[in-house]
Image: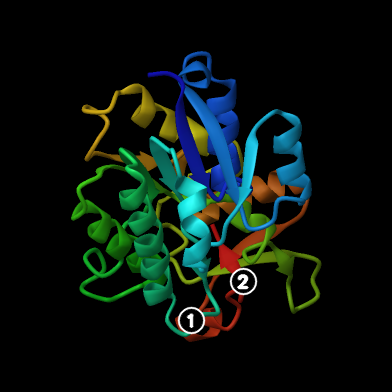
Amino acid sequence: MYPKLLTIFSATGQQGHSILSTIHRHPTLSKEYTLRAISRTTDSPTAMALKNQGIEVVSADLNTPSTLPAAVTSSHTVILITSTTYASPDLKALELTQTQSVAEACLAAGVKHIIYSSAVPGQSNWNGRSVDVFDSKATAEEYLRGLPIKLSVFLPGMFMQNFETFMKPNPCPSGDGSWVVSCVVDGEKKLPMVDAAGDMGAYVVPLLLLGEEEGVGGKTYASSGVWTFNEMVEVIGRVSGRKVRYERLDEKVYAGFMPGGDGA
C-alpha cells in the first residue's frame, strides 16, 4: 500500500536533513513514502522550512521516552540518528538508552524497517582499545540486530563540517600569521570523509530502493573520498588563501578541546 510513512530522527540535524531532503526530491521515493520529520523543537527555522514544504513535523526527544510512541505511530520505516552527547559522563550508555527507547516504540507500533546511522567500532579495530564516541553506536547497532525488525545500517566517515566547528583552523600561537589544524591522527593516515549536510542522503537512498528484503542486514559505508590531514590542510589553505599546516597533538591535550554539546 502506498504511500508508506517514513519517519526520521532527527530531521533537522546535518544527517537527517540531508536524508529527508534527498528523499523528498527523489522521483521514485517521494511517491512511495510520505515523510515525518522528528525534531525536539518544531519552531526552529529548519523545522519551519520543512513545514512550508508540506512535510509533517513532530516534536519528540530521544531522551524522553514518553514522546516516542506518537512520533513513530503508523510508520513503516524509521531512520534513526542518535545524539552523541560528548559532555555526558557515560555517553555510551546514554546513546544505547536512546536506541532502546526508540526501538521499543517501533516494536509497539509495528514498524517494519529501521535504518540506523552507526559507526565503525574502535575497540575491535584498535587493538582492543575502546573509543566511546564510535563504540556507542556500534553497541546500539548490535542491540538492534537482535530485534525482530528488519535493519539496515549506514556508517558515515568523518564529517567535513568538523572543519567549521571544533576542528576549524586556529591562528598559530607563534604569531607568524599561519593557521593550524590539530588532531591526534598521523598526518599521513588516510581518513574517509563525508559531506554530512550535502551528501548523506545519497548513501541512504539505495537502502530504500533495494526493497524490503535485499536492503536489510547490509552496511553502507558513507564516504565522499579519503584524504590525509596533510592533504586536507593543503586544500583548506589553497581555498582560503592562508598558510595552513597540520599539527598532531597528544591525546590528553586534544581531549581538552573536545566539544561539550551534541553531535548527530
Question: In the figure, is residue 180 to the left or right of 113?
Answer: right
Which image quarter is the N terminus in?
Answer: top left
Which image quarter is the C terminus in?
Answer: bottom right
**Label 2 is placed on what type of residue?**
Gly
Depicted 117 relative to depicted 251: above or below: above
Q: Position of residue 223 (x, y in %)?
A: 43, 41
Q: Residue at x 48, y 25 (%)?
A: 33
Q: Position of residue 137 (x, y in %)?
A: 36, 61
Residue underneath mark 1: 250
Quarter of the image holding residue 124? Answer: bottom left
Work out how far the residue at label 2 is from the one at label 1, CA to CA, in angstroms: 22 Å
Q: Position of residue 139 (x, y in %)?
A: 28, 65
Q: Residue at x 40, y 51 (%)?
A: 190
Q: Dot 2: what SS?
A: loop
- Reading the chain from its start, which is encountered first: label 2 or label 1? 1
Residue underneath mark 2: 261
Mark 2 surroundings within 10 Å by alpha-carbon count, few (fewer than 14), some (14 through 19), many (20 or more): few
Q: Position of residue 158 (x, y in %)?
A: 48, 53
Q: Judge by depth and name the residue closer to the eye, 151 or 154.
A: 151
Q: Judge by depth and name the residue closer to the eye, 203 or 151.
A: 151
Q: Judge by depth and name the residue closer to the eye, 206 or 182.
A: 206
Quarter of the image holding residue 46? Answer: top right
Mark 1 surroundings within 10 Å by alpha-carbon count, few (fewer than 14), some (14 through 19), many (20 or more): few
Q: Judge by depth and name the residue closer to the eye, 103 or 69.
A: 69
Mark 2 and 1 residues: CB-CB less than 8 Å, in contact?
no
**Label 1 is placed on what type of residue?**
Asp
Q: Residue at x 51, y 80 (%)?
A: 88
Q: How is the image coloured?
A: rainbow
Q: Dot 1: what SS?
A: loop
